[in-house]
Image (cartoon, rainbow, N blue to C red):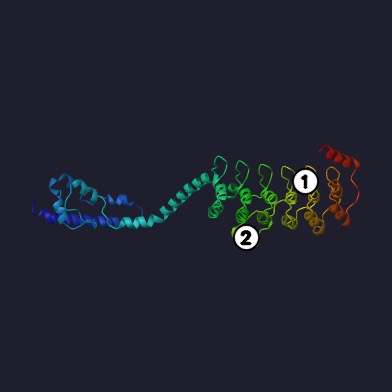
Amino acid sequence: MHPSRGPAMSKVSIAAASSEQQQQQQALAAGKKDFCESANTDSGFLSEPNLNSSENVCSSESISEGPAVGGITPPASGNQKELAVEDSAPDSGMVADIESSNAPDCDIMDICERFKRLRNTNDLAWDHQNDMGDTNLHLAIYAENAELVRKLVANLPPPYLNIQNDAAHTALHLAVLMDQPKTVRRLVLAGASLTVRDAYGNTALHLACGQSNLLCAKELLTPLSASEMQQHHVVGVKVPQNLELWNYDGKTCVHLAAETGSIAILKCLIDAGANINAREGKSGHSALHISIEQGNEELANFLLDECPRVALDMETYAGLTAYQLALLQNKMLIAKQLTTRGADPTSPPESDIESDSDDELVS
């Protein structure tokens, strides 16, 4: 190569670089061209005449001796293929500007896409049930993992809170069975249904009354406060539930509480508006009849002394009053207390007495 061509080629390179930078700056200001297009713009250095002229092809030595173009210093060694790859994307600072200008849109789209995938994944996980029909929430309650329960309840939509396992137990049923009153209240505030029935027709409150679980019963009976509704954004949750619901044995919560002799729960039920005179579906027994049949004098005294609305002369489906049932059960002390408080002292029909005597003889 002629010595005079060295400086000439340097000028051409500088002029080409200057022309390329001007074009890139114009593209950046206009904001209409993609960087990829501007980066591949023909500056004249690689125009057809120069490509066709073998005299204008620079060696790696001449490039390394010349000034850096676009802030990139070519390596001192390497083949022309490597140089062509490196020189094809000169760094003019435009890449960072374009990336930074488009970053917010890309980030938002990426976040939305990730959230969509995460939501779909969570839906599958939330809905998944094992061989026993238990969801992750059921299992967390079984394991008494309060922190995991808190996270699941906070993120699950209300319908997922009411998924039933093979025993038809929801998370709320299990929380009562596992004696977890805080979890019971958390589920109520999250929108769990209080009226879903298990395989025996029991709601969560039926279970609490049948197990004499006072703390869980209170959480299911205490109306939501204004602060709770505001803090947890509660909508459409009614506490307490309909207290006159029968289970599949025809028993309300009052009957179950009477059977277990839980006076404390009975007080809560009465305060919440439960009907103390409700008759169960199979035999027509009220709480007072149940107390006499079980010989629970403490419960009978509570009903007679502290429940002014208790019906003393209500009959069962067999036509027996509390007094008559007390006579048949040979509960003479309770019978006396009943008459003292104004119960009708009419004796039971002779047929009932005879049948009862016959039963005793047979036994």
The x, y position of residue 172, in whole percent, is 62, 50
Horizontal side of 83 relative to 297 (left or right) equals left
Count of residue discs: 2
Residue type for callout 1: Glu
Residue 114 in sight:
yes
Q: What residue is at 18 percent from the left and 46 percent from the top?
A: 51
Horizontal side of 340 relative to 151 (left or right) equals right
The image's mark for residue 172 is none
Tell which residue pokes out farthest to the top in this image.
362
The x, y position of residue 257, in whole percent, is 73, 51
Q: Which residue is mark 1?
A: 280
Residue 46 in sight:
no
- Lower sequence index among marks 1 and 2: 2
Q: Which residue is mark 2?
A: 228
Residue type for callout 2: Glu
Q: What residue is at 80 percent from the left and 43 percent from the top?
A: 283
The x, y position of residue 112, in whole percent, is 46, 51
